[in-house]
Image: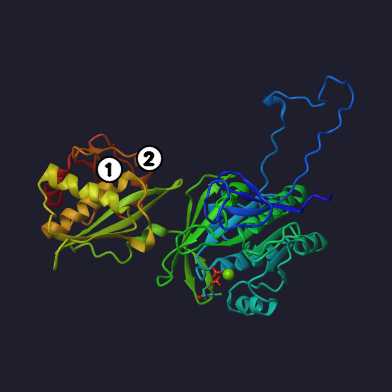
Amino acid sequence: MARPRSVYRCAECGHEHPKWVGRCEACSAWNAVAEEPTTVVVAPKRVGRPEGTGRRARPLGEVEGDRLVRWTLGIPELDFVFGGGLVPGSMALIGGEPGIGKSTLLLQAAARMVESGRRVLYASGEESAEQIRLRADRLTEAAGGVLVLGETHLETVLDVTREVRADLLILDSIQTVFTDTLESAPGSVGQVRESAARLMRFAKDTGVAVIVVGHVTKGGTLAGPKTLEHIVDTVLYFEGETSLNYRLLRATKNRFGSVDELGVFSMTERGLIGVPNPSALFLEARSASTSGSAVTALMEGTRPVLVEVQALAARSGYGTPQRVATGLDPKRLAVLLAVLERRAGHNFGDLDVFVQVSAGVRLTEPGADLAVAAALVSSLKNLPTPADALFLGEIGLAGEVRPVGGVDRRLVEAGRLGFNRAFGSGRHTGAGGIRTVALDHVDELVRAFAA
Ligand code: TYD
Ligand code: MG
C-alpha cells in the first residue's frame, strides 16, 4: 500500500495524526498540529570495508577556511545590518508588519544589485508585476533591470530562478507561496516551514542568495512557525511607528555577522533612505531646557547610539495611578520607581508616570537605567538635566549605580555629538573628550542636575 504523502504532527508532543485536527489527540494542545511530508529513511549501503563508514573526520586545522565572499546590496545601512553584505548561498528572512516598507527596501536593494552587474529575480505572490512596476516608478533607483515574476508556486519560482541564472532571489512573501509536497493551504504552519526548508536547501545547493519576506502579526511574532527563524541563516526585523518616518532594521540572528546591529532609514516619497548618523536624528527633537528628559548611549550591536528618554510624572486624576512605558519594559519601570522611592525618597506613589524613548527605539540593556531614573526625577522635581550631559549606568536594588560595558565607544559617540560630561559609576573612565562625573547612588541625582 502506498504511504500517505503527509502526516500531521503535533509541534508540542510530536504525536502523528492521519489528518489535520485542531486539537492534538495525545496532548490536547490547540492549533499545534501541522502538515509535514512523510520521509522514508533508507540506510545508505555500506561500501568498501564492511567495518568502515568510508568517511574521515579531519582535524579542524586541516579544513580549508574559505574566505567569506560578500555581495554588496548597494545600500550601506542594509549591508551593515547583514554584517558587511549578502553571503552567496545564504538565506535571510526580513520580518515586519504590513506597510512598514519591506517590499520597498528589497526592491531598492534589487535595483542597486542589478546596477552592480548581478542578476536579481523578484518573485512576488503579493503583488502583480504591474504593481511592482508602479512602486518602482516612485523610487530614485532605476529598477528596470530587475526580473519580476508574479508566482506563488514555489517549485516554479525555483525553476525560473535557475533558468534566469539569478544571483539573488527575493521572495515576497513566504506566507503566499506553496510547495507541491504538502496539501495544506499557503500560509499554514506546515507550508511556511516546508517552503523555507526547501528554499534553504536550494540556496545551499545552488549558491543563490535568497531573501524572503515574512509578515509579522500584531502580537509581534512571525505569522507562521517560530521554527522559521531556526531554519534561515539571518533574521532581520523591520520596525518603527508607521506614523513616524523612521524605520529601524535590526538583525536578531546572523550566522555571518553580529546580531542586534541596527540600521536606520527614513521613509520618503522616493523610497527608503539610509540614515548614516542615527544619534543626531534621535536627538533632533530634544528640547534640553525642559524637565523630564535625559540622554543615554546604547550599544546597538557593535554601534553606539544616543537616544533621549522622556518621563512625565503628573498628578493622577482618578483612582490607581497609571504607569505607561513605551520602548521600555513596564516591569523595569516599576523596579526603578520602587528603588527611587525607597533609596532616595522620591515619592511617585499617587502620580501617573509616563516614560518613552525617542523614535521607537527600545531600551533593552540595563545600562539605560540611570537615564530613565534621571528623566523621572527631573520631571518630579521640575529640574532639567544638564544639556551637555549623558547618563550611563545600571541601577541595583540598593540604589547603587553600576558601571556599563563598552563605555569608551559610547563616550566617543557622545563626544562627536557635542556632549561634555557623562554621569555614571565612579569606575568609568573618560574618552572622546568627555569628562566622566561620578554618580554612585541614585540619591545623588538631584545634586547632579545642579552641577
Ligand atoms: P511596502 O514596502 O509596501 O511595505 P510592506 O512590504 O512592508 O508591506 O511600503 C508600504 C508603505 O510605504 C506604503 O504605505 C507606501 C509607502 N511608500 C512611501 O512612502 N514611499 C515610497 O517611495 C514607496 C514605494 C512606498
Ligand atoms: Mg510588501
Query: How many residues crowd mark 1 within 10 Å: few (<14), some (14–19), many (20+)?
Result: many
Which amino acid type is marked by label 2?
Gly
Residue ID at (40%, 70%) = 244
Which amino acid type is marked by label 1?
Gly
**Which sits in the foreground, 428 or 90?**
90
**Horizontal and vertical percent position of residue 137:** 62, 79
> For the residue labelled by badge 2, is the local secondary structure a helix, a strand or a loop?
loop
Residue linked to disc 1: 393
Q: Quadrant of residue 426?
A: top left
For the residues labelled 2 and 1, the Cα–Cα distance comes to 12 Å
Q: Nearer the viewer, mark 2 or mark 1?
A: 1
The answer to whether residue 352 is seen in the rendering is yes
The answer to whether residue 421 is seen in the rendering is no
Residue ID at (46%, 45%) = 302
**Horizontal and vertical percent position of residue 34:** 62, 54
**Vertical side of 282 occupied by 39: above or below:** above
> For the residue labelled by badge 1, is the local secondary structure a helix, a strand or a loop?
loop
Residue linked to disc 2: 406
Q: Do residues under tags 2 and 1 come within 8 Å of each other at their CB atoms?
A: no
